[in-house]
Amino acid sequence: MGHDGHDHDHDPEHGHGHSHSHSHEHGHSHDHAHGHEHGHSHGHEHGHEHGHSHEHGHSHGPEGSAVAAEHKARAPVHVSAFVVTCSDSRDAAHDGSGRDLREGLSAAGHTVAGHTVVKDDPEAIRGALAQAQAAGARAVLFTGGTGIGRRDCTVETLRALFEKELPGFGELFRMLSYQQIGSPALMSRATAGTYQGMILFALPGSPQAVRLALDALILPELGHAVRELTR
């Protein structure tokens, strides 16, 4: 899919520190006069420290630094998730997007605590959220109702409940979506936020969109995000 080239999930062993540690050892192995040793080692150390000091402060991806890699290593591997489809026209038998979300979560090793299809209605959406909470879900993925249609109310309903909103999710999703479908991506109001120890995602209704959001953004960070909720 179009997002494959934009998942900056670098290998932590591909960081900047590996090759330079060898250079330092090489520099110190020349046991010449003090002036040469000091000048040689200081020049290399100074250059490496200043040239690559961004290793911890300027991460190029979810695992672009030792700190982020440690966070991911300590994050829960299995998250209990709940899937809610918000639609006036679809039922469980025709819920392709919800099915894709459930299958993707399960394939990644997460537990699907339940799923439901509700109308584009604030009371129904809040009821589904209560159902997810009762099932012990730590992540709730809503699909549908994020456009600008008269009945699209998922974003407004969830945003009123958010304790902390994650605007970066919507920003990154629209960027990736634009690379796939072009200017229609601006019509999406996808967002995410936290609510009573859970992380909520509001996704568009199309299967292509939910697969993009799941593979490129949600699955790489789901365990890390749930861990941060408990800090």
Image (cartoon, rainbow, N blue to C red):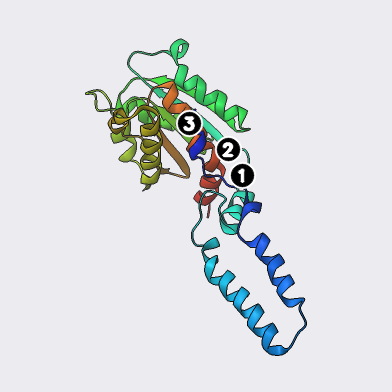
Which amino acid type is shown beneath numbered disc 2?
A: Val
Q: Could you say which disc has been placed on residue 9 in the image?
A: none
Note whether 210 is above or below 14 in the view shown: above
| Residue 97 located left or right of residue 223 | left
Q: What residue is shown at x 42% (from left), y 19% (from top)?
A: 117
Q: Quadrant of residue 41?
A: bottom right
Earlier residue among tags 3 and 1: 1
Q: According to the image, label 3 marks what residue?
A: 132
Q: Kindly identify the amino acid type of the residue bearing the numbered disc 1.
A: Pro
| Residue drawn at x 44%, y 27% as measured from the top left | 210
* Residue 192 visible at all: no
Q: Which residue is mark 2?
A: 79
Considering every residue shown, the one lying at the far left of the view is 150
Distance between the Cα atoms at labels 3 and 2? 13 Å
Q: From the top left corner, tell me how far across and down residue 126 is, in percent.
A: 36, 31
Instruction: Provide residue 25's location: percent of width, then percent of height.
Output: 73, 71
Question: Quick check: 96 above or below 137?
Answer: above
Residue in the picture at 57% in, 50% down: 63
User: Circle 2 sits in a helix, a strand or a loop, which is it?
Assistant: loop
In the shown orientation, is residue 113 left or right of residue 174? right
Is residue 197 visible in the rendered image? The answer is yes
Structural distance between the alpha carbons of marks 2 and 1: 7 Å
Q: Which residue is denoted by mark 1 in the rendering?
A: 76
The number of numbered discs placed on residues in the rendered structure image is 3
Q: Earlier in the sequence, mark 3 or mark 2?
A: 2
Q: Secondary structure at mark 1?
A: loop
Residue drawn where x is 50% and y is 49% of the image: 229
